[in-house]
């Protein structure tokens, strides 16, 4: 067995032994299960088990895996809703680690990246805004940062900011030039959560409950940060967002794929152990059809995912490939989990089995990280541009 | 406007004014919103508004509507998750009223039906059992009732018994002859909830939260009931279950149709009021496709529902028609609500809008009242039998 | 049995006895089967059987049925691909009869409607144009008619003109005011097929082969017609097209529903008579699922169709209802036939059974009479307008 | 550019220049286009272009590509319905070359494989039987071969035998032990097509028209072949069928993927060049959705295909992987082509564009090479066995 396969197996065993029982006991509700106290405990266990931070650089205590290598490990972690948190590969921290590794200065790495990679703190990625601000259409960005001497003064209104409650710092996207509706002119800022003017308005009451720190509504009211709070270059925020986005989409797919596989296996186990109509449920044709459709869509999701990961590992932006893989996966995983619910019958909508809670958690993935419709628009435009180009 | 249309309008106005605000405030969680206290208050308001108990006989304080007439009124009530409770047309009470009207003796009507129809008490219909008992396959019925002089002694284990917590009485299905796996030999019993040996084990933790009294696990341990507790004839329970089933399926469709229409209209209002990518969301083709698919499936659900209702009103058992309408509706309504969620974007998975909670509540309908797979099996067998018959 | 049910039964028996054998022998290829010679022979047989022209007024030798009454009879006729031709209820003649009954003058009726209703001649409805002319978007109408003294001079280029080869006259839609892209200003003209300047360019090679007279490309080059060739009022052509359209959509659904039901029953008979894997194919769950899905979608198509017919019989334009029914039906019927093909295995794609040919014929229905996408656009716009209206 | 990419490009250029024009002229009807005369001419051209027989061993004049390498080249060939024939990689010849390379003796290779690989002759694979013989369930094999001294006497009835008309030899599967219904006991025989007793009954009239030699019904009546006509070992026929099957499934996917991509690109070109409703069709959301869905499903098909090819190249049987890839591809390619038809509107169902004919040709792929239902049954059983195994 390869080292990688061994690591994936070790991760899976760790999840089943240490994490899944807590997930089951608290029906995937991370706050009920202890919140950051639970996080610290599980991360300590993961460190001991040698499966902590597979994505982070070795220098920061991680395992230094590339994208293709992450796939199997992240999928194993995703089998429990709390698994990614245990390995410190949850959104948005995992994507922020990736972003900071690519864009941050040495000082910023020391101050923000190192403790984040080690699990000492959490972070938030503060981009999405209420209408008419930046949502599916990022160019509508309305939050602003204006120079104030050497410093910057940030004002803005954000929501659906995952993990913001309890985060140590926010990466805030604000407009530094242009007007809402114009694509350019965004800048990223590293903003300490306790900076004056950072106001946590509320938790948006989303249906998922496994993400630590919730999905928050935030106001930035005259938040002043020094010049070295700029992440990368001024006005290059949208480009960095793309740097973060491709891999972040794929790690989302990895984690949710693990959850979907867990739902599927739970369902197969259920129908393999039940009898009705004089036969084992697993022998009934309509049941077999659902199982087979799950197997097919799991295989297709994995195949698209790995292809995109190889392209990313090869240095490509992989915008098209990751967009296709994300869109397919978000919809396929939803169908897989929905079939798993159906296969489990009444238990499928109960908390006696994990499938209902996985369904609850995976649904938003068709909306988060770009709704399927926006991805399809972008995929179609590329296809038409290819034909237009060939016609010239 | 016809009297019926006027009643439906009045019902809708009542729901929007008195019920929906509570639903919104408590995100459809009936216990959080007050449970039976809320029920009594809303039912009193419904009585004052003249929309209470549209299904019950006039003699019992109802409006005496037939099935086709109920469709529009129940749909209007279903627009809020608490609406059916307010009108006293919730499952299982509504179906139990129907069943008792058809099968109960005069004494049973006086004792059980009258207070139920008037909303003074709630009831449960106790049929479903944990594996290997009666689930999708009712012939697996394992609970037993044996004669004990003039009385009956009931033993059994049930679950997913909707509304059992707080119910005044249970209609319990128990085997009085034959063995599990043999289709015949079930009898229905009227069992007071406070009879010795009736044990509420727990609430099964289902994802829906709007059904008062929950979905409970119950044990009947040597519960003794007198001879006049038999509902209808001994050994005729499966036949009565069918009497209850056809209309109960259709009233489920009516109520959930109302919920789905509410989700759809919420979504249309959302996209009609938002702009992105330089246009109103409602002008985007992929958005229009979802809206149109919703409109089409709402129309198809209504058309199938009304056809089945007319057959029931004409005195037919309508087993095939209601099975087709239920199966189509359960799946179409789920798709309608899912598209509504998608149309609302991030808000669609939040409690800021009612769509996420409607999605949560409507999902189990593909499993309750016969999973889609069992209905398809039955529909297909009839189709093959028709061809076999024609071939003879 | 009602008179109507008796007529539908008589029609079905006639089709099975006289029409289906020809359809089977020539695999639904109307030209190979004899073209107009076959048509005349089958129509004579239909007349003798008392099932001819159920839609036409009694004065013209028809049975004078309304829309709802037509549904069962047209469906019975549609069971063979040649059935509608045998009853003289084929497109476009059937829709033209309807249009002429509503719009034509007494003289026009005598000259055009009477012989058409009696099956003495065939006709064409000449509206669709090659790009950039009138297609899915009728307002792009490019053909023109200009006054020339008391006469009109028509120039235009049309295609997909069903039945044009062998038609006695064309109803030609031409622009009499406005510019392509502006919605108004169309007029309908009754043009004899042998008028100078009417040029049949070719048959467009479409995949279907059952429509007599094919789908033709036509040029009108300085075709001069007298003033009384105008059908209805000048500049009212688009309105008349709508008069024709609603019912024509529904009779299309009726006919194709018959074809789909024939495919379905063929498939059920096939799986009921075959064994594999140690059982009858009809007992296999995945087979049952396809059968049940067909039954469900047949029922939903019928329910939507009848609802739209009742609205039309009540005098409504039924634009929304017929649009919904057409869109649902065109897609559902395609799926039904596709499942029927799949159920028949290898034979399903052969000419040994009628299912492959029905699949070939029914596919274009999702495009003809308005592509599904245009219907969805229109359905969505109405839904949004309803909300916009309510918001005011 | 890699050698492989260069070869794929060269193949595509060859197809567009030499093959597609003939395909277009004759609407994909290979007999109308010249049958074997066309084949010989196109294969000569392919040889000159250096793209002939990419799959065959170099010793036999081929290019010796492995499975993964074939994927891009076969896809390029599949862009025209006549492309695979031109490269000599059509079914069943291509699969027979593969089978003979793995199983045949040196003498059999010289006599049968060499001329087949060089395109001098064609062949048939004679396995499928009419009911109740071997169809979706191979164990029902009813044809028999009995020893007659050193020779074998074959009797059987086969149909859907692709390419049989004009084939030089048949690989005939016959039962040499066991009874129909028992899985074992099949043997493969190399039977010259002109052997006494080989009777071509008819062409089964299937909807596709691009496969040279058609799909034939054959009777073998006391056909006597010598002992060295046995291919491989006696009674090992089912095992060899599996050897042939995995790769043959994948090359089918490659070829049909090419056809589907050609349909898709045709459709994108169509909507990129047309205007309606005041915009380019390619800018309409519902059009973009279809384009994007095609792009996504093309990518998923390729990803699953390549994964299975790598497993085959690594020496695996890849039964599960190829079954998943085949099932997904057969259904996805059908949807892709169907959307392409829809995107082209009226032209989509005409012979003016290639999409209607591609739809006609690709439909049977969901039935040939194992219907989707049989693959799903097999995929589900493996999944359940995995869980059963883990539970032990």
Image (cartoon, coloured by chain):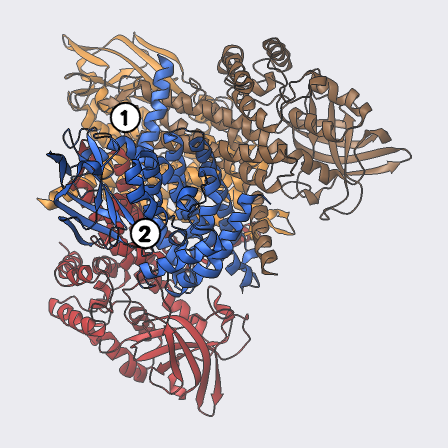
Chain colours: A blue, B red, C orange, D brown
Between residues D312 and B69, which one lies in front from this camera angle? D312
How many C-alpha atoms fall within 10 Å of the one at disc 1: few (<14), some, or many (≥20)? Answer: some
Q: Which mark is residue D30?
A: none
| Image coordinates for residue B79, horizontal then vertical, percent | 22, 57
Question: Is C275 located above or below residue A184 in the figure?
Answer: below
Residue D295 located left or right of residue C100: right
- The residue most toward the left is C392
Q: Where is residue C243, by image quadrant? A: top left
How many C-alpha atoms fall within 10 Å of the one at disc 2: few (<14), some, or many (≥20)? Answer: many
Task: From the image, tell me which residue sits under label 2.
Answer: B333
Question: How many numbered tags mark residues here?
Answer: 2
| Image coordinates for residue C219, horizontal then vertical, percent | 31, 11
Give the quadrant of the N terminus of chain B.
bottom left
Task: From the image, tell me which residue sits under label 1.
Answer: D283
- The residue most toward the bottom is B149
* Distance of label 2 from label 1 (alpha carbons): 30 Å
Kindly tell me whether residue C61 is visible in this rendering: no
| Image coordinates for residue D100, horizontal then vertical, percent | 73, 28
Q: Where is residue D39, by image quadrant? A: top right
Question: Is A214 located above or below residue C265 in the figure?
Answer: below
Residue C36 located left or right of residue C173: right
Give the residue displayed 11% in from the left and 70% down from the top. Answer: B48
- At mark 2, the secondary structure is helix
| Image coordinates for residue A300, horizontal then vertical, percent | 48, 40
């Amino acid at each position: 067995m390869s080292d990688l396969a061994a690591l994936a197996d070790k991760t899976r065993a760790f999840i089943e032994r240490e994490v899944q029982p807590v997930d089951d006991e608290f029906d995937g509700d991370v706050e009920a299960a202890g919140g950051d106290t639970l996080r610290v405990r599980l991360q300590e266990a993961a460190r001991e088990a040698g499966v902590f931070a597979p994505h982070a650089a070795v220098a920061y205590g991680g395992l230094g895996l590339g994208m293709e290598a992450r796939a199997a490990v992240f999928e194993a972690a995703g089998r429990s809703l709390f698994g990614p948190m245990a390995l410190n590969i949850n959104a948005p921290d995992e994507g922020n680690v990736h972003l900071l590794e690519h864009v941050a200065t040495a000082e910023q790495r020391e101050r923000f990246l190192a403790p984040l990679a080690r699990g000492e703190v959490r972070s938030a990625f503060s981009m999405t805004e209420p209408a008419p601000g930046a949502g599916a259409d990022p160019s509508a960005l309305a939050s602003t940062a204006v120079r104030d001497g050497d410093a910057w003064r940030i004002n803005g209104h954000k929501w659906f900011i995952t993990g913001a409650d309890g985060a140590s710092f926010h990466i805030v996207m604000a407009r530094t030039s242009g007007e809402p509706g114009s694509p350019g002119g965004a800048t990223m800022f590293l903003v300490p959560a306790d900076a004056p003017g950072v106001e946590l308005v509320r938790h948006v009451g989303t249906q998922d409950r496994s993400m630590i720190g919730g999905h928050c509504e935030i106001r930035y009211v005259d938040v002043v940060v020094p010049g070295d709070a700029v992440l990368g270059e001024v006005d290059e925020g949208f480009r960095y967002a793309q740097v973060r986005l491709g891999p972040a989409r794929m790690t989302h797919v990895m984690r949710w794929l693990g959850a979907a596989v867990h739902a599927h296996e739970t369902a197969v186990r259920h129908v393999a152990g039940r009898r009705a109509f004089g036969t084992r449920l697993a022998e009934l044709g309509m049941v077999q059809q659902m199982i087979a459709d799950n197997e097919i869509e799991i295989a297709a999701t994995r195949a698209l995912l790995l292809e995109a990961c190889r392209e990313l590992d090869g240095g490509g932006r992989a915008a098209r490939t990751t967009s296709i893989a994300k869109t397919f996966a978000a919809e396929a995983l939803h169908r897989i989990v929905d079939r798993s619910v159906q296969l489990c019958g009444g238990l499928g909508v109960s908390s006696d089995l994990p499938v209902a809670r996985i369904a609850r958690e995976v649904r938003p993935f068709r909306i988060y990280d770009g709704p399927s419709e926006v991805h399809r628009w972008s995929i179609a435009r590329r296809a038409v541009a290819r034909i237009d180009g060939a016609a010239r």
